[in-house]
Image: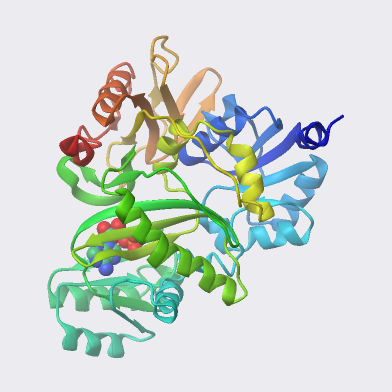
Amino acid sequence: MTVAAMVAADMADMNILLIGSGGREHALAWAIAKSPQLGRLYCAPGNGGIAALAACVDLDIANHEAVLTFCRDKAIALVVVGPEAPLVAGLVDDLRQGGIKAFGPSKAAAQLEGSKGFTKDLCTEFDIPTASYGRFGNAADAKAHLRATGAPIVIKADGLAAGKGVIMAETLPQALAAIDDCFAGAFGDAGAEVVIEEWLQGEEASFFALVDGENVLPLASAQDHKRALDGDKGRNTGGMGAYSPAPVMTPGITQRVMRDIIKPTVAGLAARGIPYQGVLYAGLMITADGPKLIEYNVRFGDPECQVLMMRLQSDLLPALIATADGALAGLDLAWRDEAAVAVVMAARGYPGSYDKGSVIHGLDAAGFGDGVEIFHAGTRRDGDRIIASGGRVLNVTALGRDVAEAKARAYAAIAKIDWPQGFFRHDIGWRAIDRE
Ligand code: AMP
């Protein structure tokens, strides 16, 4: 056997445990399931769509000892952590300590998402462009600061608040009320400290890269739509759709983001002794002065992950392993030239209260066509039936020659799905299509 063949044999039949239950995890499961190196794929807890690709297991993710025991029993070669909460809780640290390889940052590095104050201070220390800010541990100091700065201004709960801890205050009374809400516990422990920051103007963009502690491998560009309704109106949500590529991320902007934001962050964390390993997701504002960091996330975006996985041509699994092994140097990923669009179908009422339990018909209808995938975000399987069990329920994702064609194909697929209790936006990708 040649050395390459021995390495390949060694890498074959790896059992993987994927953590999470959303559309992001379905897309990751779909990409991992295509790998010739995969042995068995497990997902905890998974969902009605993931169940077709992986053995869904009922594991208490908060119980790290139980996850370790499962990994040893099933000879898991890599744990892929989808959502932020287990990362912030230190699951990856405990797995590594127990000798199990994991994709995702340590608890210390996950503070990039877990504490807005941590990230802002890192930006100051390493001269990374971001909105000017102040950190406050009590309402009196926060309000004094607000009276000095005035509005419009942005108030943020420091900790994880499931995307709800950001208040864009257009007036001073709104800002003062947001301070009262935070310190009255509207965001639980996440609001024990607040960050008050400058309201940046410009076009928002997202940037994704794999980081192995030292090396950075940028991924294809992708952009989401956060608002619930057409025309980017309505309430903020987890994301109502996404597209890739995102034309706002021109090669010039990408270069500046790498040089001024991503590389100093990765080097700064390494210098602090907390190397970052995993996928790094930067939320950016492209301002008149260039790109500025709005926030970091320490996992794939959802639904941006869905469009990235549709466009990824290379095997995902070796890239995840190389990230966890600190071996990204020299690795390259191939992407399809086609564009991808994902449209989220959500339960009526989302992001407010909504009903669960309705049956979705038409999902097994033949004829979605090649290059169309229905990723499940909030479903469970009940015999042959697929039941809606979350706010965001399906991600209808399609490839096309450009964003306009991918969009048309995604909406043609939606037309075949029979689920009156759901709703979706009709204009996903509009900014990119305007530019096309
Ligand atoms: P975050 O949870 O920090 O991503 O914030 C959610 C959304 O609020 C972002 O996607 C932006 O649209 C908006 N946002 C947050 N911070 C700022 C800021 N300093 N200036 C303008 N918009 C912001």
Measured as percent of width and height from the top left, residue 346 is found at 33, 36
Q: Which of 75 and 126 lies nearest the eye of the viewer? A: 126
Measured as percent of width and height from the top left, residue 202 is found at 19, 59
For residue 322, above or below residue 147: above
For residue 289, above or below residue 325: below
Quarter of the rendering containing residue 364:
top left
Q: Is residue 87 left or right of residue 357?
A: right
At a point 39% along the width and 85% down the height, the residue shown is 137
Measured as percent of width and height from the top left, residue 344 is found at 33, 35
For residue 381, above or below residue 250: above
Q: Which of 358 and 326 lies nearest the eye of the viewer? A: 326
Ligand 1 appears in which quadrant?
A: bottom left
Q: Which of 186 and 85 lies nearest the eye of the viewer? A: 85
Q: Quadrant of the N terminus?
A: top right
At a point 65% along the width and 58% down the height, the residue shown is 92
Colouring scheme, one of rainbow, by chain, secondary structure, one colour:
rainbow
Q: Which of 320 and 187 lies nearest the eye of the viewer? A: 320
Residue positioned most to the top: 366
Q: Is residue 149 left or right of residue 162?
A: left
Q: Is residue 50 left or right of residue 144?
A: right
Number of numbered tags placed on the structure image: 0
